[in-house]
Structure formats: C-alpha cells, structure tokens
Amino acid sequence: MMATNDRLSEVFAALADPTRRAILARLTEGEATVNDLAAPFPVSLQAISKHLKVLERAGLIARGRDAQWRPCRLDPAPLRDVADWMEQYRRFWDERYASLDTYLKDLQTRETEQ
Amino acid sequence: MMATNDRLSEVFAALADPTRRAILARLTEGEATVNDLAAPFPVSLQAISKHLKVLERAGLIARGRDAQWRPCRLDPAPLRDVADWMEQYRRFWDERYASLDTYLKDLQTRETEQ
DNA sequence: TTGATTGTCAACCCCTTGGTTGAATGTGCT
DNA sequence: AGCACATTCAACCAAGGGGTTGACAATCAA
C-alpha cells in the first residue's frame, strides 16, 4: 500500500473489499454498532472489527462511545477526495463530457492551424 | 481481494497504488510503451510490467502490439463503474446534493405526517 | 548471423491482509 | 459482587502484493 502518508491509496485499499463496501452501504442508513454491522456477514465479529479499523484509518467512518457500544457513522470526506481524483478522468468515461472535450480539442486544433 | 468475479474490488485494488495511478495519469496524454511508462519510477522494468498486468486485469488499460513494443492505452470503462458506485454516496459529500437531499427528505417527512 | 532492444516469465523475499480462535477489557444489570 | 453483553487485543496461519534478480522470447537492424 506504500507510505502511510498516501491517504488516497489507503482509501482505495479500504474500498477494495466487498465486505467493507457493504458496511459503508449499511451506514448510509444511519449509525450502527459493531454487532449490527457484523450480523449480515458469515465471518467472526473480530474480522468485522478489523474491517472497521481499516475503514476508520482510511477516515471513511468515525466512531463514538455509548456505554459498551461503539456506534459507527459514515464520514464521507475521503469519498470527496476520490471524486476529485476521478474528475481528471471524467472526460474519458462521461459521454457528455467526452463530446464536449472533443469539441474543445477540435476547436483548439483548428485555431492552432490558422 | 476476494472472488475474482468481484470486478469493483479488483478496480479499487488496482487504484490503491500511487505508481499505478501515476501510470494512468500518464496514459491520459496518450499511448505509451512499457519503457516510457517505467522511465519516471525508481523501480525495475519488471515491477512496472507487473503493475501493468494488474491494471490490465482490472480492465483499466488495454495493450496492443507493434513489433517488440506493447503500447498501452487507457480504458476508462471501469472508472465509470467506480463513478456509478460513488453516486450512492454523492449526497453525503456533495454540498449541493446534500441540501437537495435534506430538502427532499423534509418534504417527504411532512407529507407522511399529514 | 550476430547483436541490441523491448518486454515477459520464474523464482525468490519480506511484509501485509483477511481470516481464525482464545483471552482480556469495559460496561450495565440484578 | 457476579454475570452477561459488546468489543478489542494477541497470536497464529495461509494467501497475496510489491519488490528484486536472472533467464528467456521476440523483433529490428547491421
């Protein structure tokens, strides 16, 4: 995963696991405890605990305290970073942007040729 | 990384490395050979070759043949999948969508209460 | 044909990751 | 105090990732 100062890599790595993405999806519905989050999965509670630690280190979730519960909630900040990173590729996968991009490139080429 | 049929995990994993992201960035400027791509990095050519294989398996690049060269080009299709996945979280990180979302939720609540 | 260039394959190393089980910690209930 | 519940810590294991070096294949050029 390389240097720990590479936040974006940490975020992508955290997202590169279906269990963790499912946990995030669940958290879009609101806060949840570790047990809540673990329920749907056929793995041990400890495994889920580890997944949560990965998500927390990536900044994708924040955790509170309520007696013996550690409620988790979504923290979307890193997703904005991902979205920002994606922007530089948007013209390649977004049809509308692609045609706008082509249009502008053509325009520039024609102006340069004059 | 879990099952090989999990395309999205493969894509996120491929993106979770700064060297590979730098390679993708370079490819936005056009096709390039393995040597071209390797030049900026302080690692062996074989290491880059492995990175390219990861990107290829994730569908992020496609490779041609031209004599002894294997030109690489960007394939943005998986990035669209990532963007689609991100959409379900957009309301959490996009300010404008967040307020629109709140507005719609309030509206719905009020209608339910009547 | 011989040599130089481009790139991949194979074997190996070390470290990380996702999973396990078992023990420990912290907190509320009675 | 003692029990039950929620969660984490610790130790371990198998598998995979990113790196290396050395050998190999394929193609052009002399």
Image (tube, coloured by chain):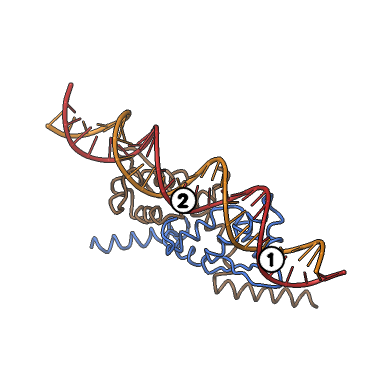
Chain colours: A brown, B blue, C orange, D red
- The residue under the point 33% across, 40% down is A70
Q: How far apart are marks 2 and 1 (CA)?
A: 30 Å
The percent position of residue A97, horizontal first and vertical second, equals: 58, 71
SS at circle 2: helix
The answer to whether tags 2 and 1 share a subunit is no
SS at circle 1: loop
Instruction: Compare residues A13 and B46 and report the one nearer the observer.
Output: B46
Residue A29 sits in quarter: bottom left
* Image-based side of B16 in relation to C19, left or right: right
**Identity of the amino acid at label 1?**
Ala
Instruction: Compare residues A48 and B53 and report the one nearer the observer.
Output: B53
Residue B71 sits in quarter: bottom right
The percent position of residue B36, horizontal first and vertical second, equals: 71, 61
> Relative to residue C15, is residue C7 depicted above or below?
below
Instruction: Compare residues C29 and D23 and report the one nearer the observer.
Output: D23
* Count of numbered badges drawn on the protein: 2
Residue beneath label 2, please?
A: A14
- The residue under the point 36% across, 43% down is A49
Query: For residue B54, which numbered disc appears in the image?
Result: none
Does residue A5 show up?
no
Residue beneath label 1, please?
A: B32
Q: How crowded is mark 1: few (under 14 residues within 10 Å), some or many (20 or more)?
A: many
**Identity of the amino acid at label 2?**
Ala
Does residue A51 show up?
yes
The percent position of residue A109, horizontal first and vertical second, equals: 74, 75
Q: Mark 1 lies on which chain?
A: B
Q: How crowded is mark 2: few (under 14 residues within 10 Å), some or many (20 or more)?
A: many
